[in-house]
């Protein structure tokens, strides 16, 4: 029996030409939901920390998930739909869709693996027609968000741990795949990039680009 491939895709600045986490906060600021003076500088600072590899994921999630706890789900869903049209769809590049389609046509098991929370990213995964989403999970009780994170954030080592948990639940450990691909732009994803058999740097940051070249990893652009 022919073994299938596994194709994993980072989302922000990989499949998307921008960062959905950052843009969600900016969207709420632009709509007047969040106070610009209080939030914009902090949002920018967290983004700089992510790029330099110094981000405290729990501090960031306290900032990023807090607005979800302040508003009813019906209002959040309405904002999210507007956000998809205004911010996300323009960031979906045709080359990203073509890459996913090529893996799908080859019979690969495909998943998006992202640090961005699942409230934001679930409709993005649907827009890419990818069934499996491994994302940071916001905690909720009775259908309302608490503003806290549930379980292990899908970030750095946590991203690898979450993928391994998902594959174990599927009964398909990584070693059983003929080839395992992971596409990412960020050095923050090194734990998972180093675990798969086919790491691919996509429009990578400078640190990942240097590492990819030194290790002979494939480097591509989807832009």
Image (cartoon, helix red, strand yellow):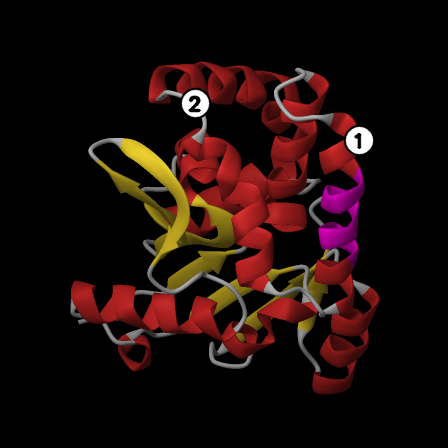
Disc 2: which residue? 71
Place residue 134 in its image quadrant. Answer: bottom left
Which span of residues is magenta-colored? 41-48
Specify whether residue 45 is painted magenta.
Answer: yes
> Residue 162 appears at what percent x and percent y?
36, 66
- Please check the rendered image and state whether residue 62 is part of the magenta-colored stretch, yes or no: no
State how far apart marks 2 and 1 are (Cα).
Answer: 20 Å
Going 30% across and 31% down the picture, which residue do you hit? 144
Q: Residue at x 71, y 69 (%)?
A: 54
Can residue 113 be seen here?
yes
In this view, 169 is above or below 215: above
Give the main secondary structure, helix, strand or loop, of the magenta stretch.
helix
Residue nearest the observer in this picture, 81 or 49: 49
With respect to residue 211, does 137 lie above or below?
Answer: above
Q: Is residue 213 left or right of residue 193?
A: right
Which residue carries the number 1 mark? Answer: 37
- Which quadrant: the N terminus? bottom left
The circle drawn on residue 109 is none
> Residue 83, percent across and down?
57, 21
Answer above or below: position of 161 versus 148: below
**Residue 33 spot, x, y in % from top left:** 61, 20
SS type, badge 1: helix
């Amino acid at each position: 029996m022919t073994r299938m491939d596994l194709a994993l895709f980072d989302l922000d600045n990989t499949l998307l030409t921008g960062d959905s986490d950052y843009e969600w906060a900016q969207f709420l600021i632009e709509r007047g939901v969040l106070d610009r003076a209080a939030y914009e500088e902090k949002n920018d600072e967290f983004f700089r920390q992510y790029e330099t590899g110094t981000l405290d994921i729990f501090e960031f999630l306290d900032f990023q998930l807090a607005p979800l706890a302040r508003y009813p789900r019906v209002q959040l869903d309405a904002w999210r739909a507007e956000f998809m049209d205004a911010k996300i769809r323009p960031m979906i590049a045709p080359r990203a869709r073509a890459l996913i389609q090529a893996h799908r046509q080859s019979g690969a098991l495909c998943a998006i693996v992202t640090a961005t929370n699942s409230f934001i990213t679930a409709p993005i995964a649907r827009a890419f027609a990818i069934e499996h989403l491994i994302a940071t999970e916001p905690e909720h009780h009775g259908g309302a968000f608490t503003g806290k994170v549930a379980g292990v954030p899908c970030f750095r080592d946590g991203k690898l741990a979450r993928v391994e948990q998902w594959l174990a639940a599927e009964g398909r450990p990584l070693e059983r795949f003929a080839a395992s691909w992971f596409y990412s732009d960020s050095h923050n994803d090194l734990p998972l990039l180093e675990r798969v058999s086919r790491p691919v740097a996509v429009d990578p940051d400078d640190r990942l680009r240097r590492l990819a070249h030194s290790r002979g990893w494939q480097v591509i652009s989807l832009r």
